[in-house]
Image: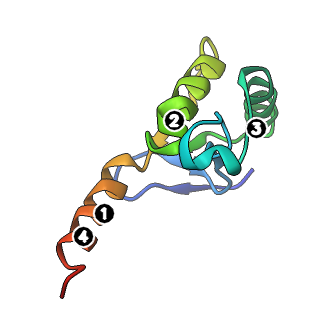
């Protein structure tokens, strides 16, 4: 697995990221995927075995169900650590910025 420095954070993250948009089956993301807890555990185990240490998540995926499933699937697996990176803050800032300028 290849790793890169994450800005000035001191963290080295894998260049491949596991996206969690398909976890859960609620709201508008239900059509994207219906990955449940058992499948999420398998996916996360495979990713960790391959050296992946970065997971992309947001509370808007399946109305938060993807974060709940991802959290349950990761439970007990942080051995030197998988870094759960949430794009939530950036996503919300971008949404606010875009919505403020939508009428311009």
- For discs 1 and 3, the disc positioned in front in the rendered view: 1
Which residue is under mark 2?
A: 83
Q: Are marks 2 and 3 in contact (CB under 8 Å)?
A: no
- For discs 1 and 2, the disc positioned in front in the rendered view: 1
Q: Is residue 57 something one can see in this rendering?
A: no
Which residue is under mark 1?
A: 95
Percent coordinates x, y for residue 29 in the rendering: 60, 48
Q: What residue is at 61 percent from the left and 11 percent from the top? A: 76
Q: Are marks 1 and 2 in contact (CB under 8 Å)?
A: no
Q: Earlier in the sequence, mark 1 or mark 3?
A: 3
Distance (Cα) linking label 3 and label 4: 36 Å
Distance (Cα) linking label 4 and label 2: 30 Å
Distance (Cα) linking label 1 and label 2: 24 Å
Crowd class of label 3 (few under 14; some 14 to 19; many from 20; radius 10 Å): some
Q: In what quadrant of the picture does the C terminus appear? A: bottom left
Distance (Cα) linking label 4 and label 1: 6 Å
Question: In the drawing, does residue 11 fall left or right of residue 39?
Answer: left
Q: Earlier in the sequence, mark 2 or mark 3?
A: 3
Percent coordinates x, y for residue 28 in the rendering: 56, 49
Which residue is under mark 4?
A: 99
Crowd class of label 2 (few under 14; some 14 to 19; many from 20; radius 10 Å): some
Which residue is under mark 3?
A: 47
- For discs 3 and 4, the disc positioned in front in the rendered view: 4
Percent coordinates x, y for residue 1 in the rendering: 75, 50
């Amino acid at each position: 697995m290849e790793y890169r420095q994450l800005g000035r954070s001191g963290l080295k993250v894998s260049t491949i990221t596991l996206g969690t948009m398909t976890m859960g089956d609620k709201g508008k993301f239900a059509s994207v995927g219906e990955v449940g807890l058992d499948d999420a555990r398998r996916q996360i185990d495979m990713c960790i075995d391959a050296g992946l240490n970065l997971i992309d998540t947001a509370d808007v995926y399946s109305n938060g169900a993807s974060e709940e499933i991802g959290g349950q699937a990761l439970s007990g697996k942080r051995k030197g650590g998988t870094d759960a990176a949430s794009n939530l803050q950036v996503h919300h800032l971008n949404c606010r910025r875009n919505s403020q300028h939508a009428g311009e």
